[in-house]
Image (spheres, rainbow, N blue to C red):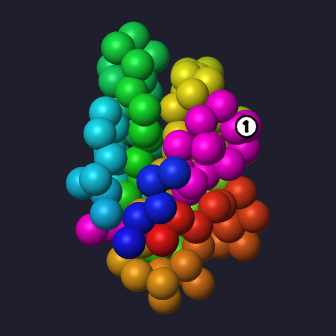
Amino acid sequence: MINKELIELQKGCVATCVVIQSEDCKQLDSKIIVNADSNDSELLTTFKENISNKEEQDYFIISEIDKLNESLQNKYYQIVKDREFHGYKLPKDMVIVLTVKDREGLKKISQELYHFCIVAF
């Protein structure tokens, strides 16, 4: 069960992200979703077209982070830490959300990235 209050408290917090179960993603309104296995070009397009120039969204969701090996999670570590990707910044109040299949998926998040995570389920 998603803890929506805990997620809302992360608005404006620098260098944090929230982890939820994939199935709970549908409960979040006003969101931009990217698959964790997106390549840099796809991610850059998302930042250019959907984040920097559009109306404000509340959530930037990186789905299925637990399906990536730890070394491939590094680009998301940088996004969470710096709140930007190739010069395109996330809005201050946008919450970064990672999704995992279940509690076991938490163990598959790299330690560096996990240090920034708030588990909201």
Q: Is 13 covered by the magenta stretch?
A: yes
**Between 92 and 9, which is closer to the camera in this rendering?**
9
Q: Position of residue 28 (x, y in %)?
A: 32, 47
Question: Split into 4 quadrants, where in the image is the N terminus?
Answer: bottom left
Q: Name which residue lies at 45% across and 53% down.
A: 4
Residue ID for mark 1: 14
Q: Is residue 26 left or right of residue 16?
A: left
Q: Name which residue lies at 39% across and 27% down.
A: 57
Q: Is 93 covered by the magenta stretch?
A: no
Q: Is residue 68 left or right of residue 46?
A: right
Q: Is residue 64 visible?
A: no
Q: Secondary structure at mark 1?
A: loop
**Between 48 and 27, which is closer to the camera in this rendering?**
27
Q: Is residue 92 visible?
A: yes
Q: Tell me which corner region of the image, top left, top right, bottom left or bottom right, holds residue 22.
A: bottom left
Q: Label 1 neighbourhood size at 10 Å, few (<14), some (14-19), many (20+)? A: some
Which amino acid lies under the numbered mark 1 shown in the image of this protein? Val
Q: Name which residue lies at 51% across and 51% down.
A: 5
Q: Name which residue lies at 31% across and 63% down.
A: 24
Where is 68 relative to 107, above or below?
A: above
Q: Tell me which corner region of the image, top left, top right, bottom left or bottom right, holds residue 89.
A: top right
Range of the magenta residues? 6-23
Where is 17 relative to 79, above or below?
A: below
Q: Position of residue 32 (x, y in %)?
A: 33, 37
Q: Position of residue 68 (x, y in %)?
A: 46, 71
Q: Position of residue 73 (x, y in %)?
A: 57, 62
